[in-house]
Image: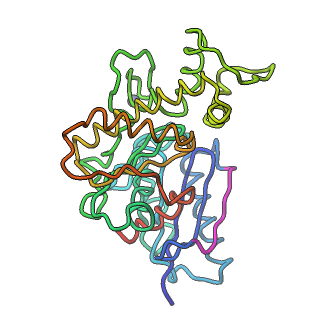
Amino acid sequence: MEKLLCGVDLGGTKLSVGLVQSSGKILDRIVVYDHVGKEDEVIVNYITQLVRKIILANGLEESDLTGIGVGFPGHVRYRDGYTITTSNLKGFKNFPFRDILAKNFTIPVRLDNDANAQAYCELRYGAGRGYDDLIFLTISTGIGAGIILGRKLYRGNTGTAGEFGHTIVDPGSDLVCTCGNKGCLMGCACGLALPHHFRKKLESGIKTTLQLPADFSYDKVDGQLISRGVAAGDPLCTAIVMECADYIGIGVYNIFQVFNPPVIILGGGLCNLGEMYMTRIKEKFYELARDMIFDPIAIVESEAGSDAGLIGAAALLLE
Ligand SMILES: [Zn+2]
């Protein structure tokens, strides 16, 4: 029997544990939300229980698995399996995550950043199939990325390579990123920036045709609200989408200049902002890259979908 991979996708709101075939097919999964607010060590023990539970529920033994791959929502020091920081969970500062989890099992454990896991999923099973090199950018509440060179993840010296979210695209911006700098790509164009853009544009006199609820506050502005507005032709939401797309277009252009990759894959919830968003990203990119493109570059949407984190975490064992 083919050995299975166990994937763990640890998110700020959702924790998924799954059994995955090497073909990328998920055979079974457990999803929980009650890890939120718990301390690092408690969460690792919880993951241990969930892995044991899914093994048992499928009539398997630990030896039927190749290993356990974990995608973590923050910085990871890959070579020694430490988490460095995360803004999505309590604790995990210089925390020996991999070894604490590994001590509960006899099979190998891999730990990497969640965007790296997603990038690897795209390479094996998604929009990156057939390529040796790719850059994956995920645009959602935050912005993360993964760099694949020669079919392997490029992690840099520490393991934090690919943090394009913290590259500065607008030094004059008054938008402060979670890292504390002004004008980061993430600060300007991720989900967390939407309330700021909404307020700023409203104050500048752009009208919205959206029916805002009586209890409306700016912190309720999210990707879904903006998508609704765009679909209804709302000028305010349209202006926000165009501005965010311009920032991402600049980010994509910078990536192109650094890596000259054959493909850049865009994923994450904000890609659902609509056709106009993706079109504008490409327009901005081609506006900037002009005659500096010698070979075609594909800028495409992720194909791995919402399970990319789980499948990618499991697939880390195949790298
Ligand atoms: Zn930043």
Q: How far across and down, in percent of the image, does residue 313 sit? A: 47, 62
Considering every residue shown, the one lying at the far right of the view is 214
Q: Is residue 29 magenta?
A: yes
Q: How far across and down, in percent of the image, does residue 76 sit? A: 38, 48
Display coloring: rainbow
Q: Name the foreground residue: 261 vs 96.
A: 261
Q: How far across and down, in percent of the image, does residue 283 sit? A: 38, 36
Picture quarter containing residue 122? Answer: bottom left
Residue at 20 percent across and 39 percent down: it is 291
Tell whether 51 sits left or right of 161: right
Tell whether 106 sits left or right of 162: right
Which corner quadrant of the figure contains ligand 1? top left
Range drawn in magenta: 26-34
- The total of numbered circles placed on residues is 0
217 relative to 285, above or below = above
Residue at 48 percent across and 67 percent down: it is 314
Tell whether 285 sits left or right of 202: left
221 relative to 8, above or below = above
Quadrant where the C terminus is found in the figure: bottom left
184 relative to 298, above or below = above
Picture quarter containing residue 208? Answer: top right
Picture quarter containing residue 120? Answer: bottom left
Residue at 24 percent across and 36 percent down: it is 290
Q: How far across and down, in percent of the image, does residue 3 sit? A: 48, 83
Q: Is residue 206 magenta?
A: no
